[in-house]
């Protein structure tokens, strides 16, 4: 198997929908039993029931996990346009059962060839308000279409047009939007109203639709059909490419046709971590999340550790996150462009030195660790899918367009909503992005460079079985994944519902505070951390929409869990 191996992971709460998913050769069944042989089982966890249904439809047509991942990702582009889509990017972890081959497929967006930091500053050297978040300058070249083609052709067993079929149908025939879509559209109503094509595409008579409104996207259906028929050329050349370049540049961008023609996904070696008997396989740069996860786990390995929610242990997790995010800010960027000390940052010796600075009795002030720059930007609105098929092939993929509804730019005639991932670059050390986060020179804008991301899909394997897990949430993805892994490894039994539903806390070095979910931690828990010197901030809304699949090694049964925080729970 590919991969670099590094290093040698309670209290739970909240309910989450979970079920056993069984798939016989004839197709999906709404079953919760565990009585089918493991060879006939498959599972999909996604953020929307229609996306999950699309994946099972492809299973029923003889597709494998990779075909299903293409179908689910494409369907999410239709039913969750505010989170991901053909105009965005993402990271994919693939495991091929027949030979154990594991690979990271990097479909992160790239800066256009004419992009420079100067584009985002005025004549006085001040950042142009909103330039990295709205308008053509905010848009990076999308990678999702190239990934769908690459995965289907290299790893799938069905024609791409077949795997895209359910998404094409949803886009053309329409689907009833749920409360989550209605709520997000209302939140971004004024933004969408300011963009005529986006308003016609995603609103109802220029207003946020109510639940039950049938959203049809015929132009997007045609684009997906072009990709299905022509592969890369259906998106990165011809009519679609021309329309994308025109739309971006009309809004102030600097795209050239060659930016699309030259886009390529990159297959990378995954990062592999050993932690207390478990092997965690996750993504490498340009995801900053994998290194931060590895570094945090290696530091925590130096302490006696059980329940990640107990105040004593929560203090240790917070201190590990504080140090991991500091290193992220100071060192990480696209290592195809800048030298990143990955070997040092992921070494046991370095983790031991960093862990030695953790005081079990007192919070370290972030300013005491040195440079006050905050971590590099991270994707803020994403989606995740976890899949395993009856052969044991598996996929964990996290996809994004950055902020809700991305840049808002929809190229006429294509239905493609474009990202605003240029905000994930660092302009200057003291210039924050949309999430009030700052970064360093390693993550500066440069032509054809990929911005850092927090997306951290992962496989976790131990004697209990195989866990496929991931989540959206911007910088909070790392802490979500860390807590879930600690919960999984620290338990002798597996309760997926509790793992994905457990209360969450987060620290990212700067600003120096611990964020906690509303109504999730007792006053005694909070006072215990405050007594150690932590400053707590309760976030009014819970975060994340974790999707998990688990296959037991004991009996081969497969189960899924969807985060109860997500408005749309997809399960069978």
Image (cartoon, grey):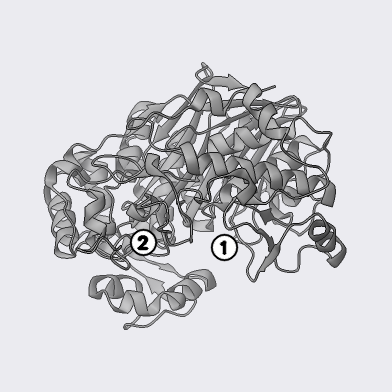
Q: In this view, does 48 lie above or below 159?
A: below
The answer to whether marks 1 and 2 mark residues whose Cβ atoms lie closer than 8 Å is no
Tell me where residue 140 appears, x and y as whole percent: 28, 50
- Quick one: SS at disc 1? loop
In the rendered structure, the answer to whether residue 538 lies left or right of residue 117 reads right
Classify 346 as above or below 569.
above
Name above or below for residue 530 compared with residue 115: below
Please tell me whether mark 1 or mark 2 is closer to you in this view.
2
Residue 36: where, in percent of width, then height?
70, 35
Q: Dot 2 corresponds to which residue?
A: 406
Q: In the depicted view, which residue is nearer to us: 487 or 32?
A: 487
Q: How crowded is mark 2: few (under 14 residues within 10 Å), some or many (20 or more)?
A: many
* Residue 504, horizontal then vertical, whole percent: 70, 55
Q: Name the residue under label 1.
A: 568
* Residue 18 position (above or below residue 449): below
The numbered dot on residue 127 is none
- In depth, the one of 129 and 159 nearer the eye is 129
- Left or right position of 371 against 231: right
Give me the C-alpha separation between circle 1 and circle 2.
20 Å
Tell me the crowding category of disc 1: few under 14, some 14 to 19, or many 20 or more residues within 10 angstroms, Cα based: many
Q: Where is residue 544 in the image (x, y as percent from the top left)?
A: 59, 57
Q: Which residue is drawn at 21% across and 61% down?
A: 411
Residue 341 appears in the picture as rendered:
yes
Q: Do we see residue 25 in this rendering?
A: no
Question: Dot 2 lies on which element?
Answer: loop
Taking the spot 47% from the left edge, 71% from the top edge, the residue there is 184
On screen, residue 377 versus residue 323, left or right, reads left
């Amino acid at each position: 198997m590919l991969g670099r191996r590094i290093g040698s992971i309670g209290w739970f709460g909240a309910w989450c929908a979970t079920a056993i998913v069984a798939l016989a050769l004839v197709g999906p069944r709404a079953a919760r039993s565990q009585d089918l042989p493991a060879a006939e089982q498959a599972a999909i966890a996604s953020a929307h029931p229609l996306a999950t249904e699309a994946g099972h439809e492809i299973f029923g047509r003889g597709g494998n996990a990779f075909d299903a991942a293409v179908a689910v990702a494409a369907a999410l582009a239709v039913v969750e346009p505010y989170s991901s889509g053909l105009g965005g990017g993402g990271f994919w972890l693939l495991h091929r059962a027949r030979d154990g081959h594991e690979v990271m497929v990097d479909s992160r967006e790239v800066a256009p060839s004419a992009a420079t930091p100067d584009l985002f500053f005025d004549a006085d050297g001040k950042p142009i308000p909103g330039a990295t978040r709205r308008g053509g300058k905010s848009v990076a070249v999308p990678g999702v279409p190239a990934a769908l083609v690459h995965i289907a052709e290299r790893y799938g067993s069905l024609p791409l047009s077949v795997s895209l079929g359910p998404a094409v149908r949803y886009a053309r025939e329409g689907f009833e939007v749920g409360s989550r879509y209605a709520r997000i559209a209302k939140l971004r109503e004024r933004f969408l109203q300011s963009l005529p094509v986006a308003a016609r595409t995603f609103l109802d008579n220029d207003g946020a639709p109510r639940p039950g409104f049938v959203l049809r996207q015929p132009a997007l259906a045609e684009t997906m059909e072009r990709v299905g028929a022509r592969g890369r050329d259906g998106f990165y050349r011809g009519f679609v490419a021309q329309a994308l370049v025109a739309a971006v540049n009309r809004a102030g961008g600097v795209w050239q046709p060659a930016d699309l023609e030259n886009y390529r996904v990159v297959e990378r070696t995954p990062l592999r971590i050993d932690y207390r008997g478990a092997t965690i396989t996750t993504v490498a740069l340009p995801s900053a999340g994998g290194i931060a996860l590895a570094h945090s786990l290696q530091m925590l390995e130096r302490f006696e550790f059980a329940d990640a929610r107990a105040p004593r242990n929560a203090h240790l997790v917070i201190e590990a996150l504080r140090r991991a995010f500091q290193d992220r800010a100071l060192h990480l960027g696209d290592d195809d462009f800048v030298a990143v000390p990955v070997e040092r940052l992921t070494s046991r010796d370095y983790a031991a030195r960093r862990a030695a600075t953790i005081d079990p009795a007192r919070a370290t002030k972030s300013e005491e660790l040195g440079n006050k720059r905050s971590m590099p930007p991270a994707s803020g609105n994403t989606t995740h899918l976890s899949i395993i098929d009856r052969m044991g092939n598996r996929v964990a993929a996290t996809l994004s367009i950055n902020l809700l509804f991305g840049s808002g730019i929809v190229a006429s005639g294509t239905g493609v909503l474009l990202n605003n991932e240029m905000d994930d670059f660092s302009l200057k050390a003291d210039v924050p992005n949309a999430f009030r986060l700052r970064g360093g020179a390693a993550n500066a804008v440069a032509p054809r460079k990929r911005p850092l991301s927090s997306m951290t899909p992962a496989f976790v394997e131990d004697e209990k079985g195989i866990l496929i897990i991931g989540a959206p949430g911007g910088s909070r993805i790392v802490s979500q994944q860390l807590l879930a892994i600690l919960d999984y490894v620290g338990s002798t039994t597996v309760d997926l519902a509790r793992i994905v539903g457990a209360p969450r806390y987060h620290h990212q070095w700067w600003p120096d505070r611990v964020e906690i979910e509303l109504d999730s931690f007792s006053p005694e828990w909070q006072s215990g951390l405050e007594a150690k010197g932590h400053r707590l901030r309760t976030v009014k809304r819970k975060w994340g929409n974790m999707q998990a699949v688990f296959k037991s090694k004991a009996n081969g049964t497969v189960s899924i869990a969807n985060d109860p925080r997500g408005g749309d729970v997809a399960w069978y």
